[in-house]
Image (cartoon, rainbow, N blue to C red):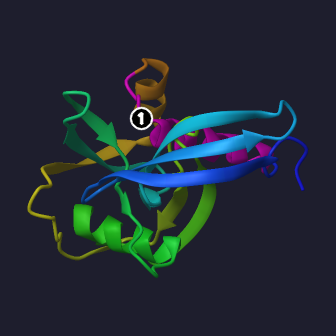
């Protein structure tokens, strides 16, 4: 067991559903903190898990998407991503979402890492993958998706990162993890 990433020692006292939507559920939960001997109140968003894909056309070119994100009122540059459906493996969701959003199917896929984007209020877990050997197919966008596909060079991606133009946690973690792993394995960045 890791030193700092371990199970909590709180006892769950109760759980009540406050909201049940298409995308998220909100639960009100009460816990008993055994160390401090006190009750703790929490509101948690149960959002399901997601998959994010860093798709490489070749060693120097990635596929990214530009998409409107209504919660922040901005159009952002991101990697293809989506929810993992009930009973679906994270890597299968990644392959499916990549093809749906970009029209490319991955021949090879490898998990880079995973992250919890909002641990203070959500249980969402996001798996981050690298995809290679892409084959052009057809997009299958959901009716609510407004996505533009972009080809971005590694150098351009580095510059976008350095200029502070990448703001989503999944993209930041994907970029940092990918380049950190390349350095560790002494590959050319």
Q: Is residue 135 left or right of residue 30?
A: left
Magenta-colored segment: predominant secondary structure: helix
Q: Is residue 44 left or right of residue 113?
A: left
Q: In front: 46, or 115?
A: 46
Residue 139 % position (x, y): 18, 69
Which residue has dot 1 on it?
A: 168
Which residues lie in the magenta part? 165-189
Q: Splitting the image into 4 quarters, where does residue 92 fall? A: bottom left
Q: Residue furthest top?
A: 163
Residue 137 % position (x, y): 22, 76
Q: Is residue 165 left or right of residue 139?
A: right
Q: In front: 143, or 112?
A: 143
Q: Residue at x 54, y 58 (%)?
A: 127
Q: Residue furthest left?
A: 143
Res. 106 in view: no
Above or below — where is 102 with respect to 149?
Answer: below
Residue 173 % position (x, y): 56, 40
Q: Is residue 175 rendered magenta in the image?
A: yes
């Amino acid at each position: 067991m890791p030193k700092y990433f371990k199970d909590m020692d709180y006892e769950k006292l109760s759980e009540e559903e406050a909201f049940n939507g298409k995308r998220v559920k909100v639960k009100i939960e009460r816990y008993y903190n055994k160390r401090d001997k006190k009750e703790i109140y929490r509101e948690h968003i149960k959002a399901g898990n997601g998959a994010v894909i860093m798709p490489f056309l070749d060693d120097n070119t990635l596929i990214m998407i530009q998409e409107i994100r209504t919660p922040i009122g901005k159009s952002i540059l991101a990697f293809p991503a989506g929810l993992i459906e009930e009973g679906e493996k994270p890597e299968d969701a990644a392959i499916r979402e990549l093809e749906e959003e970009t029209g490319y199917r991955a021949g090879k896929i490898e998990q880079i890492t995973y992250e919890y984007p909002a641990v203070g209020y959500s249980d969402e877990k996001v798996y981050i993958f690298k995809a290679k050997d892409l084959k052009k197919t057809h997009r299958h966008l959901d009716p609510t998706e407004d996505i533009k596909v972009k080809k971005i060079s590694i150098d351009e991606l580095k510059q976008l990162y350095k200029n502070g133009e990448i703001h989503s946690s999944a993209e930041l973690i994907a970029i940092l993890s990918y380049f950190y792993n390349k350095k560790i394995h002494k590959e050319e960045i």
